[in-house]
Amino acid sequence: MNSTAPFSRHNSIIRRTLAPAMSPGPGGKSACIFCEIAARRVPAHVVYEDDATIAFLDLFPYTRGHLLVVPKHHGARLSDLPPADQHALIRTLAELSRRTERLTPDYNIGLNTGAKAGQVVFHVHFHIIPRYSEESPFDVIDRVRLTDPEARSLLDVLSAA
Ligand code: AMP
Ligand code: ZN
């Protein structure tokens, strides 16, 4: 049976690999991997940054160019963010959507909210997932870790304003 939640499935390898980084942890903020990336204490393939938001390549992309669009303000869900940060996030989402169209006109935008919806990192983030084939975007697929050469070639396309 196909998953009805397009962005909810993570295979066990991804869960095992990212589990330590994804744990909300007892310390809350300090254990949050996306806060660490936003503060530039943890490396990521960043394609865009402004005062309120950051966007980077997903480490286990569903497809080539899979991006995460993230507010710098920590909150588990969109409704946890102050309105100014919500608005900034949507502006950045639109900007990165425009850039994604350099790869393909077809893409999904997703936001998993809550564990039952497949949220694994409890710092709100939009996924932009480019689509290249006619296969159902909702099929569950195995994902492989992003390689550095692939990341560099994507940064060339997606970092330019
Ligand atoms: P979600 O299920 O919506 O919480 O998705 C979390 C996403 O974050 C997954 O697609 C992961 O592959 C991705 N991810 C987790 N840690 C990192 C990281 N350090 N750098 C880039 N992507 C990450
Ligand atoms: Zn955070």
Image: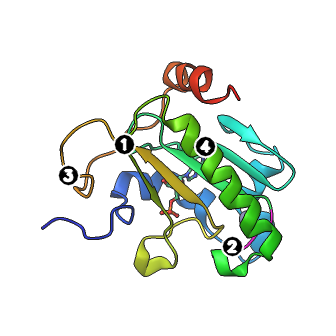
Residue that carries the numbered disc 1 in the rendered image = 106
Residue 2 picture location, percent across and down: 17, 65
Mark earlier in primary sequence (1, 3): 1
What residue type is disc 3 on?
Answer: Ser
What residue type is disc 2 on?
Answer: Gly
| Circle on res. 128 | none
Q: Looking at the rendering, in which quadrant would you find the C terminus?
A: top right
Q: Secondary structure at mark 2?
A: loop
Residue that carries the numbered disc 4 in the rendered image = 96
Dot 3, crowdedness within 10 Å: few (<14), some or many (≥20)? few
Q: What segment is highlighted magenta in the picture? A: 73-77
Residue at x-position 61% and y-position 67%:
23
Q: Secondary structure at mark 3?
A: loop
Query: Taking 21 as reference, is 26 left or right?
Result: right
Q: CA distance from mark 1 to mark 2?
A: 36 Å
44 drawn magenta:
no
76 drawn magenta:
yes
Residue at x-position 39% and y-position 61%:
7
Residue that carries the numbered disc 2 in the rendered image = 25
Q: How many numbered badges does the structure rendering display?
A: 4
